[in-house]
Structures are given as structure tokens and as C-alpha cells.
Image (cartoon, rainbow, N blue to C red):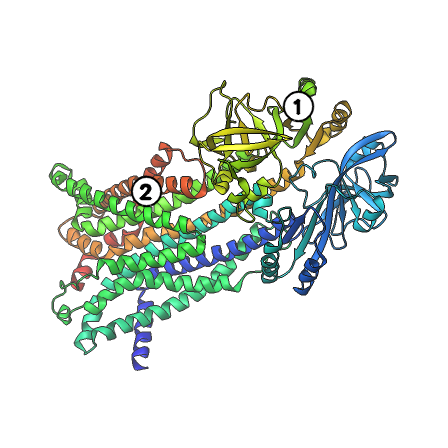
Amino acid sequence: MNRFKLALRLLKRDGRSGELTLLVLALLIAVASATTISLFADRLHRTLTVQAAEFLAGDLVLTSSTPIEDVWLLRAEALNLTQSQTAEFSSVLLENDQMLLAAIKAVSQGYPLRGFLKTQETEGGTENRVVHGPEPGTVWVEKRILSALNLQLGDMLTVGEKPLRLTRILTYEPDKRGDFYSFSPRAIINQADLPATGVIQPGSHVHYFYQYIGEETRLGALKKWLKPRLNPSQRILDIHEDRPELGSALSRAERYLGLSSIVVILIAGVAIAMAAGRYTERHFNASALLRCLGCKQREILWLYTVQFLVLGALASGIGCLLGWLGQLGLFYVLKPLLPQQLANPGLLAVVFGFITGMAILLGFALPPLLRLQKVSPLRVLRRDLEPLPAKAWLIYGLAISIMTVLIWRYSNDWRMTASIIGIGLLTLLVLGLLVTGLLKLLRPLLPKLGLTWRFGVQGLLRNSRASVSQILAFSITLAAMSLSFTVRSDLIDQWQQQLPEHAPNHFALNIIPAQQPAFAQDLLRAGIDSSAFYPVVRGRLVEINTEPVQKRVSKDSQGEAAIHRELSLTWASAIPEDNTITAGEAWSADQAGWVSVEQKLAENLGIKVGDNLLFTIGSAQVSARVANIRSLQWDTMKPNFYMIFSPGTLNDFPTTYLTSFYLPDSRKNFLNQLLRTYPATTILEVDQILKQFKTILMQLTQAIDLLLYFALAAGFTVLFAAVYATLDDRIQQGALLRTLGARRGWLRKTHLVEFGFMGTLAGVLAAIMFQAILYVLYSRVMHIPYGLSWLPAGILVATGVLSIGLTGYWGVRQVVNQSPMRVLRRL
């Protein structure tokens, strides 16, 4: 207890004298930033997950081609899960001598469990949000059904054999899916009216959906119970698989939030290590005095460890409070962009913020503190007697271990963790040797430099080990900050490229070959730009190298979903421009019998270049050899195909054409004209999905922008920590030079030269490190196209010179302001 009181008294004394100010500031920023980002990312993730669940109208959705067994429904009830049901099918509507193929959805009580519907009670009226479906005996339809069938609200619409009253215009439904049966003009009826329609008969093509919401653990239990009982026509839907265009955006945003957390922790850790190093050096004399008074080495270590534990607990607690307030501020700023219902802050995120603070403090501050127990009592008489440095493996191993655990926790991705740690350490080792070599090359050039430049460069060479550490710390900071900005910009640019202003929002299917030229001409006359017309043949993959394809698939994989249905097969003389060949080569225009396979499907089915694939098309069979494997972007909202054949391979089979085009809302009636002219063609409308997608991307972009400020705050802390780490030596050297006649202005110039040169080296090293890590992240982890650019390198060098030069100049202003006599008396 006496030793604990002594530790607290020493801590209080250091706090009053300002010894701990910089270290506490670094720790506060680290904990506040980490807690803010942890809370913000956790709440944003859970909020967007709930919002993304609105696209499925539930947290968990089971789809089936037939009604599920009652025991499955009872199982969900036993788990206290709220559930609803929908059935979707196509049906021809006949009214006023007009005919229209429509998509009918029958919904149960409680639908939608997540999200809402938007309807209008009058044509052109205001949209109203509703959280229920139509009442029995009524039907809600999209506006195009009214114009196509010459109907008005209040009229009767017969679905199958059941007349229903038109009561509302449907403008939005949360779970409008991406399959071909969902994009026809929509009508929603109550599930109670479904038997009376008489539409559902044995052999009818119907999609049944069962939605569930409830506690995550109960949903997981239901999912685990259902999986072994699913047949090939049943599937559990997931936002990342069922809606890949949304899942891809969310996945990349989650990776970026994890990267932002990593950047802040890494930068703050460097600042804490430097601040702790200076604290240690300033306590050598005090430790020597304690040794003279009888303290043993382990007692010295115990005293300082207790101080840092108490300090860490206080600073981490305050940092967690600041982090809580910080995430509230972020959500307040983003309030207009985020959903009305936000997930509550998670207590575990706060606890982890506290643990993060303690881990960062011990991981980066404990190795320098170990030097204090090695201080010799003789230092009381010999001030130049330095304790032996701690072993390198301990200094770096502990910090690297802590960083590895934290990076994995924030990113939840071992590949990203290994990429950052591995490439970062290798780059640091190479760059450290490079800086050491450059400083040695500078030493013979000193006599040839002017006086100001000579003393400025000599400031780097005087303690080359400290200079190398500072330059590497600056380069890590610059590279990490630049990495945050660049990844953010490239993510947003790629999202915007995927969805330009006039991205295709309608698809035309089943275009008869004889009508394709006229269809294209009608679009052109109407001033509508369309994409290429793709020929489509429906077929099924059955064998890979004479092996039945069923033997190669795993449960719930993309491959299983692909082999249990017919695929849309097409052919082209060249691979589409937004596809990238990852293995194999493109074919010549006159080569038949080749096929290109989408990369993820090839991985799931174990397909390689040179394999022979067998397809059934109708009653015939076609074989083709794999020419290449290609990657594509499913989130571009453009036509994409699992299989693309070389020209001439599918010439003998019936073909229809597929295209896409952009049509503004004001010209929706043009679709009815097209369908009257080409009644066999099916028009799919995806404009609502595009609007939802753009909304969620805008929210993610705004959140990403605000997270960058934390990395900037941590970065400036490193700059000042690095400057103050050598401040004591600079004050002594400045006093000696002032005593020998040096003027203040000349000393300021030498400091500008020293830190400007240091900034140049740090900027060059940061550019190298930045490009190395960026290449690995883009090509191996985030799957973003990588391109080498010299502009970021120039910006990094310029930023290093300005930021480090000005920060160093400001930080060492005490050197020229201190009285030489006062400094010399302390020596």
C-alpha cells in the first residue's frame, strides 16, 4: 500500500510538472478516436444491416418453389420470431380489351416486417408510407397498370377469377427483387384473396417467401435448424448474396471503416511510443536516486507500471466518454442522410475502446519503461551513464503483437491484417536500412555545405538512430493518412462509375430476332440510348470433364444455386469491356466451341482453363472447352452472364435478345407503347433499386468523409510527439550555440533546414510505403483496380516538407527562447 501511494504521488507530481501532457494527449486521441470509430462503425453497421434488411422485408428470408411444411412455421413460433409470408407469380391481366403480363404478389398480415411501402391514394397525389399490405378484397397496382388497361382508382381489376377494388397506386416496395419475375408491372393483393383467384394450380411457377425478424441468436438458431432440411429449390436469402449490388457496397464500406480504425490506432501508437520514450529519458535521474535509496529493479518497474496503469485507466475512461460524445456528433451531422431508426450504441464497443486504450498504452509504452529498471545508481554522479536499451525483439514484438490483435479485431479480416503487418514490416525494414545508408552518405558532404545547411543537416547526423526513428514515424503517419484519403476517393469514384447519372434502369427481354432491328430503331427514334443487344439461349450445365456437376457443389454455394436452374447463355466475338480475364486467353472471332466462365462460379465448381463443359439446351447437348476465366462487377446494374460462348457455338438453337436502356420517370408511358408493338417482349423496371442503391452509397460516402478527421488529429499528434522526443537535447545544444554567439534567427534557419530535409526524406519513404501497401490492399483484399500514379508521390513529398517543417519549427521554438545561462546551470 505504501508503494502504491508513492506511485500515485509520483504520478501527481509528473502531472503537475507537465511531464505527462503529451503522452496523455496522445492516449486521449487514440482512445477517443478508437471508441468513436468503434461505436460509429458498430452503430452504422447495425443500422445499415437493418436498412439493408428492408430490401428483403425481414432479417431472415426463406424462399421456396412450394409451400413449406407447417412444422417449419411452428419452429419459428417456438423461437418467438415474428413472421410473414408472400407469394409471387406472373399472371395476365385482361381489362377493357387490353392485356398485360403483370407480377402479382400476395402478402400476409404483418408484411413488411422491415421497411415500408409507399402508395398514393389519388393519381399524382402525395406519397404515403404504410407498414401493411392491402386489405382483403382490394388491390394496389403500379401506375403503369392503370394506363395500360385504361383503369382508374376505384375500378375493379380481376386477378384470375377474383375481382378486386383498386384502392391505391403502389410507388415503392422494399423487397422488389432482381429476378425476371419481379420487374414486370406490379400488383399486390392480400393473401386471403389468393385461393379465390384460382391462379395457383398444380405445376404453376410460384415463388414463396417467408420473412422472419427477432433476436439475432434466435434467428441464427432457426437458420442452423433450417439449413440441413432445405431441398435444392429452397434457399435462405442474404443481403450479400441475394442483392449483390448492395452487399458489395456494404462489404467495401465495412472494410474501409476497419481500415480507418487501423490507421488511427497505428498512428496513435507511434505517438504514444515516442512520448513514452521521452518520459523514460527524463526519469533516468529520478530512477537512479530511487536506486540509491534502496529500491530494487523490480520495485522501480512496479512503481512506473502502476503509474501508467492508473494513468491509462483515467485517460481511457475520459477517452471513452469523448468517443461516446464524438459518435453522437457524427450521427447528428449525418441525421438527414441516415434512417430515422438508428441502432442504439453498443456497450461492448465502449468496453473495447477502453481495452484498446490500455492495450495501446502497454504495448507501446511498456518497452521504453523497461529501461528505467536498468538505470545504475552511479548515474547520480555520472549523468552521461545511460542504461542499456531493451532487447529489440521485446520493444518491437510486443507492439507488433498488440497491433496485430487490434487490426484483426477492427477489420475482422486476417488477409487484411497479414497484408498490413507483413508488407508494413518488410517495407519499414528496407526503408530503415535505406535511410541509414543515405545519412551515412551525407556525412562526407558536410564540409562542402554552407554554414546554415551544415548545421541543419548535422542535426540529423548527430543522433542518426533517433533521426531514422523520427523519419520512419513521419513516413508511417504520412502513408497512413494518404492511404485513408486515397482508398476513400477510389471507393467513391468506383461507386459513381458503377452508377452514372443515366445508368440503365430498364431491361427488355425475350426480343424476337426478327423484331430486334425494328425494336432498336424504335428506341433510337424515341431518343433512347440502349446498351448492346445480347443473344440469349437458356441452358443448364450438367457435366465438367464427364463428371456430373452435382458432385462438385457445396451446400448453399453460388455453384449450387447456378446448377439447379437454367442459365442465360450468350455469345460474343470479344469479352465485354467491363469484364476482366483473370486466367486463360481471349478467342479469335472465327473460333467456335469455346466458353468463358465467371470467376466466382468457376471457383465454386472447380472449373479451370482447358476443362470441357457439357450443357443441355432443350433436348440437345452442347460441349465447349473453357478458354478463360473472367471477373465481372455484378453491382454495375448492366447485363452480366455466367457463361459467354465464342461465336458459332450456339447458332443452331432458338434465340431471343436482351438489352437495357435508361428511361426517365416522365416517359414511363412509352413502355406501354413498346409492349403494344412487341407483345412478346418483357420489360423489367429496376429504377427503384437504383434509387435505393444510390441512397445507401450517399450515406456511406458522408460517413467516410467524417471519419478522416480522426486520422488527421492522430497524425498531428505524432508530429509533435516526434519533435518533443528530442526537445531536451535541442535545448541544450541551442544554449551552447547561443553562448558561442549564434543568433536566434540563424538557429531558426537551421531548424527549418533540418526539419525540411527530414520532411523530404519522410515524404519519399511514405510514397514508397503507400504504393506498396496500396497495391496489396487493392489487388489482394479490396479487389479494386490498382494503377501507379506519380501525382500522389509528389503530393506526399510536398506535404512532408510543409507539415513536418512547419510543425518542427513550431515545436522547437522553445530552443531559441530559453535563456542559455538557465539551461547551462541545469546541466
Looking at the image, which residue is at 57% across and 49% down?
334
Up the image or down, 117 lies above or below 297; here it is above
Of 422 and 482, nearer the camera is 422
Q: Residue at x 70, y 38 (%)?
A: 181
* Front residue (pair 161, 611): 611
Q: Residue at x 86, y 43 (%)?
A: 164
Q: Position of residue 336 (x, y in %)?
A: 61, 48
Which residue position is annotated with label 1? 528
Q: Which quadrant holds residue 567?
A: top right
Vertical arrangement, residue 400 with respect to residue 809, above or below? below
> What residue is pinned by disc 2?
769
From the viewer's perspective, tell me whether residue 651 is left or right of residue 182. left
Residue depicted at 84% across the width and 33% down the height: 94
In this orientation, does residue 800 appear?
yes
- Residue positioned most to the front: 546
Give the crowd class for mark 2: few <14, some 14-19, many >=20 residues within 10 Å: many
Figure check: 281 above or below 12: above
Answer yes or no: is residue 578 visible.
no
Under mark 1, the amino acid is: Ile
Q: Residues within 10 Å of mark 1 (few under 14, many from 20)?
A: some
Query: In what quadrant of the picture does the C terminus appear?
Result: bottom left
Residue 180 numbered tag: none
For the residues bearing labels 2 and 1, Cβ distance under 8 angstroms: no
| Apparent side of residue 784 relative to residue 420 in the rendered image (left or right) | right
